[in-house]
Amino acid sequence: MKVYKNIYERIISLENLFSAWDAFKSDKRNRIDVQEFEWRLEENIFALHRDLRTKQYKHGAYSGFWIKDPKPRHIHKATVRDRILHHAIFTMLNPIFEPTFIAKSFSCRIGKGTHKGIKALANIIRKISGNGHKKSFALKCDVRKFFDTIDHGVLLRILGKRIKDTDTVWLLSEIVESFTTKYSNFFERKGVPIGNLTSQLFANVYMNEFDQFMKHELKVKNYLRYTDDFVVVSDNRNYLEGLIPLISKFLKENLTLNLHPNKVTIRKFHQGIDFLGYIVLPHYQQLRTKTKKRILKKLFWRIREHKQGIISYEAVEQSLQSYLGVLSHANTYAFTNDLKNQYWFWLHE
């Protein structure tokens, strides 16, 4: 296993911090806290660099808010100063860990994503089922309260397998320990905030341990994962049933995670496999009804914001094109036309 030393200076370099600022600010220029930071940009970046160099840096507090996507999620937002550092850390660490991830891990990775995950699942199932002519089954699971129950000690131990730089380990500990959830106790601190860029990397690093277990110890061939949602495909239902206790045991004993008791299912391919907002069927994909309703609701509110002068027409049009892109990956001809009609009606009523 390749290990990495002496990377702290690259993380905290002024060049990396200013590059991190450029990446961070790209779609946030109109936000008040970003404008305030930019008003004294050089002074703020140099101060951050000085605090990191002298080890005086302390991660700030978070502000919380709720979103519905589609279920309620509690997002925790760090200060601009801290988020710039998150970008700087991600820039240096992601290339270290990215090559260790399996090909069928699709969350928050360049060249991957939701649509690639759906396409991969459809291809696997069609292969196993002989294009729908043979019986095939999909075991689908997800982890209960995944981000809330990531164990800090376990995460730092995993990161420490490759990061042997004492200063970088100190900084990672500062980031990880900056946040806890109600699942923590006196002996175990748990939770990473959904709002941090570093949390996306930490989640993949954490669940990569499970990916390696599935691929190399259990030797599961037809497996793919997106964050904490994962699917195994087989033509043998008994085989899939036998995996469940092995999966549960590994997650609990090695990652202090638990499968969601209501979200462990085995379905026949012709029944449709519900994954990442789509229903994968033998010869096409459908969009989940909940996903359709969410798209309509979000587009309605975007148009309402435009009429109130909060966002531009171009921003509304971008939202529409984004949703049409989502629909293009499924059999949604009728719904696509309905969405376009509703868009025109809401915009001109």
Image: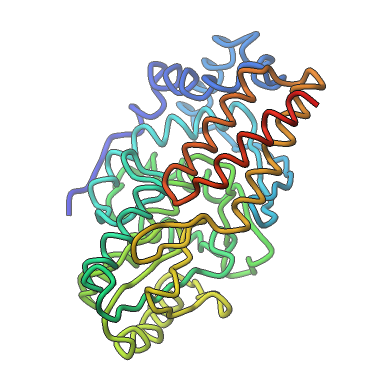
- Vertical relation: 27 (above or below) 97: above
Of all residues, the one furthest to the left in this rendering is 1
Residue 215, x across and y down, in percent: 23, 69
Q: Nearer the viewer, residue 73 or 11?
A: 73
Compared across the picture, whether 69 is left or right of 257 comes to: right
Residue at x-position 41% and y-position 36%: 90
Q: Is residue 264 above or below residue 77?
A: below
Residue drawn where x is 41% and y is 46% of the image: 329
Residue 213 visible at all: no
Quadrant that contains the C terminus: top right
**Is residue 69 toward the left or the right of residue 2 in the image?**
right
Percent x, y of residue 197: 50, 39
Which quarter of the rendered picture does the N terminus lie within? bottom left
**Quadrant housing residue 183:** bottom right
Residue 13 in sight from this viewpoint: yes
Q: Is residue 227 left or right of residue 314?
A: left
In this view, the residue in front, 78 or 212, is: 212
200 left or right of 8 in image: right
Count of marks, rendered view: 0
Q: Nearer the viewer, residue 218 or 157?
A: 218
Tell me residue 139's x, y (percent): 39, 76
Quarter of the figure with residue 249? bottom left
Classify residue 40 by image quadrant.
top right
